[in-house]
Amino acid sequence: MGSDPRSDPRSDPLSSLLFVYGTLMRGEKNHGLMSRASFVGDAATPAGFALVSFGEHPGLVREGSGTVRGELWLVDAGVRDELDRFEDHPRFFRREPIVLGDGGLAEAYLPVEDVTRLPRIAGGDWRGRGATPSEP
């Protein structure tokens, strides 16, 4: 018996690429939400992004001259809807298109609120979690 094509996000015309950079990455506490998505590979933003720390999770912001490391996933409409609820899109995080470091396009969740007073995560890598109180 073959697998149901509806369970494969690559067969869904509404599938999209999602850049994740925090607790949704492999090995992190909320990765289980990605169980029905397909891992594409490691990815990074181009220069001009930073990570801020909300304590238990990060936020991706368009600022500075750094890059942010994360993962690229193929998600179908159902997974995207679940993640929208989890990320409280569009009230807390807003899913937005971004250009990746390799020139490819993906979506990512960016915080809606003013994050100027939040500490930055040094090196743009959530797994390193080197938060620093530096200004943007």
Image: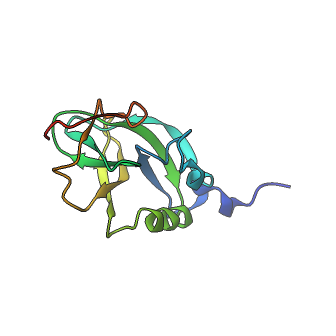
Q: Position of residue 101 (x, y in %)?
A: 30, 35
Residue 16 spot, x, y in % from top left: 46, 56
Locate the C terminus and report the quarter of the image it occupies: top left
Tell me the quarter of the picture where residue 123 sits: top left
Classify 78 as above or below 59.
below
Q: Residue at x 46, y 68 (%)?
A: 85
Q: Residue at x 32, y 50 (%)?
A: 54
Q: Is residue 73 left or right of residue 90?
A: right
Residue 133 spot, x, y in % from top left: 20, 37
- Return the residue found at the far right: 1
Q: How many marks?
A: 0
In the image, 96 versus 30, the foreground residue is: 30
Determine whether 47 is above or below 94 in the image: above
- Of residues 2 and 115, the one drawn nearer to the viewer in this rendering: 115
On-image quarter of the N terminus: bottom right
Q: Position of residue 44 (x, y in %)?
A: 35, 35
Q: Determine whether, in the image, residue 121 is placed left or right of residue 39.
A: left
The way the protein has been coloured in the rendering is: rainbow
- The residue positioned 41% from the left and 36% from the top of the image is 43
Q: Is residue 51 left or right of residue 8?
A: left
Residue under the point 53% across and 42% down: 28
